[in-house]
Amino acid sequence: MLCSLTLTSLICLYLRAIPRPWSTMKLWMMLLILLLHLGNAPWMTVVCVSLPAPSKVSISSLNMEHTLSFLPGPGTPPDARFTVQVLRLRKSQWRLLAACTQLTAGQKCNLTRAFKDRYEQYQARIQAFTLSQTSNWTVSEKFLPLTDTVLGPPDVSLSGCGDCLLLRLGAPIAMEFSPTYRVHVQRTRDGVQFNLSLPYKEETVITYLQPGVEYCVTVSIWSVFNKNTVSSAPHCAFTSPPPSRISYVVMLGLLAAVCALGLLLILLHFYGLQGFKVLRKCLSTTLCGGGVSIEQSAQMSAVQHLKEGSADCLLTAQRLLRNTSDGERKSMERTVKSNV
């Protein structure tokens, strides 16, 4: 173990350097040394540099939220604590970070407030310590918030508008410059895809799309100052509502009903003609005795009715002749004969 000189040795060397006229002061100093040894004052013990230094010190940042992480050196005791200091390179002076003076193994230090200037370069260092021991400082790499932070995915909302998509975006952080958004669009049905570069707007319309088709969109931020970006998760939507399964079932049912009705009409037309012909034949046979058609039977009925009417007329005329005179009878006979 490499240790510096003890407190007693330092005081003795100091007393020897004092000139003789100051012998009274020497005495008082010797008494003080004796009291320190008798009281065994631990706060005056000279600390030895013996703890292993922390390792893998790094600064990670997402959307301007900066965090210092580290690992304890091999052989670091469990009761060891860690302290952090930060440096602003333009000032060249290390400053103790009050929120990170008693870190334990596995804890992280938030550097967001310490690294508040985006255009300034910073460094951080960390040291392990116990009541009687310390370690060497481990210094991080230089860090510039503007270029070294990771720009996370924006907030994305997607909805259909007929033959287009309405894209709503929200910036992950307040930016001092106007970023460009890179939009990747892919059609779910067949995987056709294309890319767009859009200036920042809260609402953007993606046009010339197919109605009733699903598209998936991923968005990332692109900046001239920072290439560390993370794309959003895919967000999918239909340009317009697709036809539901119920409508498909209804359409199929209607089509089946129309087909069945058409088939029924065809059958009725075919079998109806045949039935009418059979019925006509049966009626002809029944009415005419099996050998005379309907037209012939109708003509025979008309002649018979005319004959029967004529006979009735003759009988009536004969009755009238009996009751009349001879002259009148002759004229009536001539009239009847002319009518017949």
Image (cartoon, grey):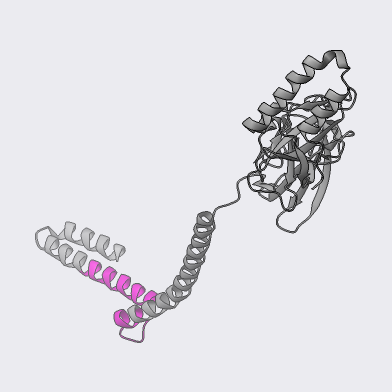
| In-front residue for pair 143/245 | 143
Question: Where is residue 238 shown, x and y percent of the image?
Answer: 65, 47
| In-front residue for pair 237/119 | 119
| In-front residue for pair 191/312 | 191
Q: Residue at x 61, y 50 (%)?
A: 242
Q: Main secondary structure of the magenta part?
A: helix
Q: Is residue 208 visible from the viewing direction of this image?
A: no
- Residue range of the region highlighted in magenta in the rendering: 284-311
Question: Where is residue 275 shown, x and y percent of the image?
Answer: 40, 77
Q: Residue at x 13, y 60 (%)?
A: 320
Residue 223 lies within the magenta run:
no
To which quarter of the image does residue 83 belong? top right
To which quarter of the image does residue 108 belong? top right
Residue 290 lies within the magenta run:
yes
Question: Where is residue 93 shown, x and y percent of the image?
Answer: 86, 24
**Which residue reaches farthest left?**
323
Image quadrant holding the C terminus, namely: bottom left
Q: Identify whether 285 is placed above or below 81.
A: below
